[in-house]
Structure formats: structure tokens, C-alpha cells
Image: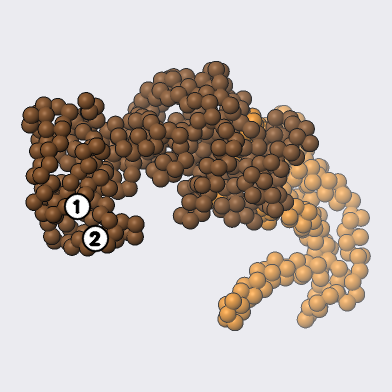
Amino acid sequence: MSGLKRTVFWTGVAALCAWVLVPIWLIGLGAFGGRTGVFRWPKSLWPGDASLAALQTFLAVEGVWPAMVNSIIAALTCMALSIGLGAPAGYALARFSFRGQNTYRLLILLTRAFPLAILALPLTVAFIRIGLYDTAFGVGLVHTALALPFAALVSASLFQAIPRELEEAAWVFGCSRWQAFRKVVLPLALPGIAAAAIFAFVISWNEVFAASVLSVKNRTLTAYLLTVLAESPLHFRFAGGFLLILPSLAFIFAVRKYLFAMWGIANR
Amino acid sequence: MAEITIDGIAKSFGATRALEQIDLTVADGEFVALLGPSGCGKTTLLRIIAGLESATSGRIVIGGRDLTEVPTRRRGLAMVFQNYAVFPHMNVYENVAFGLRMQGADEARIKARVGKATELLHITPYLDRYPAKLSGGQRQRVAVARALAVEPPVLLMDEPLSNLDALLRLEMRAELKAVLREARTTTIYVTHDQTEAMGLADRIAVMHGGRIEQIDRPTAVYERPATTFVGGFVGSPPMNFLPVTIANSRLELPGASLPAPQASGALLMGIRAEDLTPVADGEGLPFDIAVVEPLGAHDLVTGRSGQTLLRVAAPAGSGHKPGTRIGLKPDPKRLVWMDPASGRAIQAQ
């Protein structure tokens, strides 16, 4: 790389890192710096009087832990259902040609066209009738509706990128359709599926409107924080925000190796 | 080891007919090449034999077993794909072992067979590598080794060399021939490259428009094409076809008189470029030279005799000049006569 190219490259890298890291750093400062840290200017790189006081106080607030558990249940439900239903739908879109395929593809996208606000009231009524109202699972179901189209379309393009011949080779050498999928297609699609799963998890974790409408006592963390933190001092809000991003970060770190293609698809 | 019988296989995609009533028998241990231009149905036929495509009608019988309704995985075949289709997430060893593992072979047997196949194809040093770290030629070898490791009764190959560069293709062709002779597997090999088919196959089936135009030994296909299509497709340069008029069961040329298979009327005379000998102007066929291409082994001379384009392989350095007229003497023993209306060969009496 020439000097100029190198400069442009690293500037880009720095800008992207800053885009993600600066907000996290600010939230971190607010969360650990205590009451004074929030208002201090200029900001220090590291909170001088770092303390877990705010976080501890925050975690001690009644209802935070159950709300976090609810959030996790909803997010895992959303993730499991989005991938469990979306990946097979994506495989069907990628591998089989059937009548109305393009319409089906469009319909998947159109499910995102309904504003959640319009759906909220009938959903609430329906959920009360079925007995799903005010449960984390119910919230997870609604989040699935939000994440599923994305999961289906992403996995469709994932499966499309895997050469059909690989599957055919597996069949020729003795695999049933399912075995070929498990032994050949799935391992190759896994990085992408993991990424789609993370996305579904994060969609659910961050979603606040449906969660607020569909629950009263069993709130998810976002919905809970929205009501509780409105009356809290600023550094508590930062502590809450920090806890909110923590699981997403941890989750992405845990599956990050799947995010980078481990084996480039060597064919073609 | 098995004999393959293809019995009246036809295939339609909607209204288009891809294959019309294909009948073909491949003997045990034989190597048959399906040769034809793209879109002639050769790959479709191969995929039907593999069970990757279903035939509209007809039967596939291998080793006495009717496989028409049997799913691909139970046909016990092996196949080499055009883009190799080696599994990117498995190393070379696991790729080659894949078929054996699916058969439930024990580890000792897998090890022995993989060792044998990889040795045969000279890829033993790469057993731990992943396909992304292999060159095209090495991946190709892995694909062939994977197919041979299961010691299949029938091996199907779909243009396995077409993604390699020219020099590597030549090298792999010779190697493949040696390897397959040793394995003695019944092989069907799809290609659009006539030199590949000529060099490798025991018999060539030339396909065109969903039909088999001719099936015979390579030299017979080359020397005695059954149709004008075969003559034009097999061989480089393609066979020359010259419209002539017959009288008294003979074709009279200046300085030559050739016996013809019918008493009178119009015929096509088919002759290979190397079977026309340049002679002085006034003898044989009059020939106006347009282009001379020195190809090293011989000079390829292109020109016209009357309205017909002819190509002649003249001895190298024979010094023919464009724009001059010479005569051409056909070798009477190597003529093929074709019916101009049907384009089919007329059997010489």
C-alpha cells in the first residue's frame, strides 16, 4: 500500500472504531464515574474515581433483575423462532422454484410494512384472550414477527451463495437430503446464520414499544428502564444504559468467530 | 464394475425437449465420452444417470439393477463435477473419505482407501489442507480421488477438466487416462472438447439437439462420421464438405476419377484437411488460396473451390501463397459420401 492509501485506510478504520467505541466509552464514563463524572468536562479517558456504586445501586433497584431475565427470555425466544422458522424458509427460497416465489419473497418483506402501533391494540386483546399477555414469551413472539423477515431473507441469500453442486456431491456420495444439509450446507452457512441470530437477539433486546404495550408487571429491561429511569438521576440512567448494551456486546463477542468466514467458499 | 443400459431416456423441460429417446449401452469397464456442443443434452443425460434429474420417460439400468426410481444416494455411483464441488469445510483427507464414511466403513478401511486414492493422484502431501489453500489442479485431483476412493462401479464425470488452464488440462488428461485404466471403472465422461473425448474414450457418443448422432471408437468417429454434424464437430479443422455431381457412378475430376456410391445425382463429398494433397494447378480440384496459417507441424491453408470453403493441411514450409490457384487431390480411400438433403452418410459399397 502506498502512503496515501495507508493513511486513508487507517483513517477509515479509526472512524469506524470511533463510531462504535466513543458512545460506549461515554456511557461507561457516566456509569462508573458517579454523580460528578457525568458532568465533568473535559472528559477523562478513564473515570478517575471509578466506582461500581451507581451500577450496584442500579442493580439493587427492585425489579431490574427480573426485567433482565424477561429480556433474555424474550430475546432467546425471538432468536430461536426467527432462525428456526426463517432458515428453512430461506432454504426453500434459495433451492426450490415454486409458483409465486417472488410474491412470497415480497410478502415476507411486506410484513414489515404494518406499523407496530396499529397492531398493538388487537395484539393486546388477542394476547389477553390466549393468556400470553404480560409474559416474556409473548413479547418474544412479537419480536419474532419483527426479526423473522430479516432472518428468512438473509438465510435465503446465504444458502444461495453455497453452490448447489456441493449438495449434489453429498447426495451422490450417499447423503440423504437432510444429511447433506447437516454435513455440508449447514457448516458453510453457520457463520451467516450466527450473524442473523445475533441480529434477531439484538432486535428483541432493543425493542421497547411492543414490550411496553404487551406487558405490565413482567417487563423486559428496556420497557422497565423506560418507566423507572425517567425519574432517576443521570448517572443511574447511564448505569442502566451500560447494562443494556453489555449483554449485546458479550453475545457478539461470544459468537464473533462465526461472523468471520472461517473457510472462504472455495469454489467458483 | 457394472454395465450401464440407457433405455429410451427422454427429457422435456416444459415444452422444450432436451433429450429424445436416448439408447446407449456402456460395457463393463468401458470409458464412453458424451461429446457435443453446449445445450445438446449431454449434461442432462449424465444428471439423469446420477439421479440428480428425473427422466420424462425411459429406464436406467446399472449392473442389472433398474435405478430409474432409486434416489441418488442409493445408486452407488461416484461423480466428478465441473467445478469440482470439494467440500470447503473439510480438509483433503475428510473430503476423500466422505463417501466411505457415508457407507459406514471402519476407520482402518477408510485410511487404507484414502491412502490409495490420494497416492494415485499425488495429493498425499496435502491431506491436512483445506480446499481454499489448494490450486485448481489440486482441487480437481481431490475431486477425482474422492470419487475413486469409494471404488464405484460407475464413475460419472461432468467436464472435469474444463476449468483448468490449457497446459494443466493436457497434463491431467494423460494422468486421468492412466489412473482410470488402473481403476478399471465404467466411466461416462461429458465434454465439449473433442480432443479430450478422442484422447480418453474407448467410444465417443456425439450428441446434437438431444440425440446421439453417432457412437463409435474415436478413430471411426473421426474418419467415418455418420452425419455432416459429426464431421464438422469432431476434428480440428472440421471435415470439408464439397457438393459434387455424380455421373455413371463416378466423380470425374481433372486428372482423377473417383468411384461414387450412387449412379448419379448430387452428393456431398466429405474429406479431412490432411487427406487433400496439394498438386499443380489444373490437376484435381481447383483451389484458390485465401489464407495460409503456419501451425508448426503443418500449414493450414484455407481457400475456395468454386463456392465451397475448404481447409487443407499442407506440409509445413510448402510455400503456398495467398491469391494463387493450385489443385487438390483427395485420397480416394478416405472419402465419406453424404446425402445433401439428410446430411447422413451413405454406406460405400
* Left-right relation of A110 to B284: right
Please state which of residues B337 and B227 is positioned toward the viewer in this rendering: B337
Which residue lies at the image location 74% right of the left edge and 45% below the top edge? A75
Which residue lies at the image location 19% right of the left edge and 37% below the top edge? B269
* 3D distance between C-alphas at marks 1 and 2: 9 Å
Q: Where is residue A97 in the image (x, y as percent from the top left)?
A: 49, 34
Colour scheme: by chain
Q: Where is residue A155 in the image (x, y as percent from the top left)?
A: 61, 44
Chain ID of residue with mark 1: B
Please state which of residues A227 and B214 is positioned toward the viewer in this rendering: B214
Report the label total: 2
Residue B278's mark? 1
Disc 2 target residue: B318
Chain ID of residue with mark 2: B
Which residue lies at the image location 51% right of the left edge and 20% below the top edge? B61
Q: Position of residue B175 (x, y in %)?
A: 55, 46
Chain A image colour: orange
B70 lies above or below A36: above
Please state which of residues A186 and B188 is positioned toward the viewer in this rendering: B188
Q: Looking at the rendering, which quadrant does residue B199 occupy?
A: top left
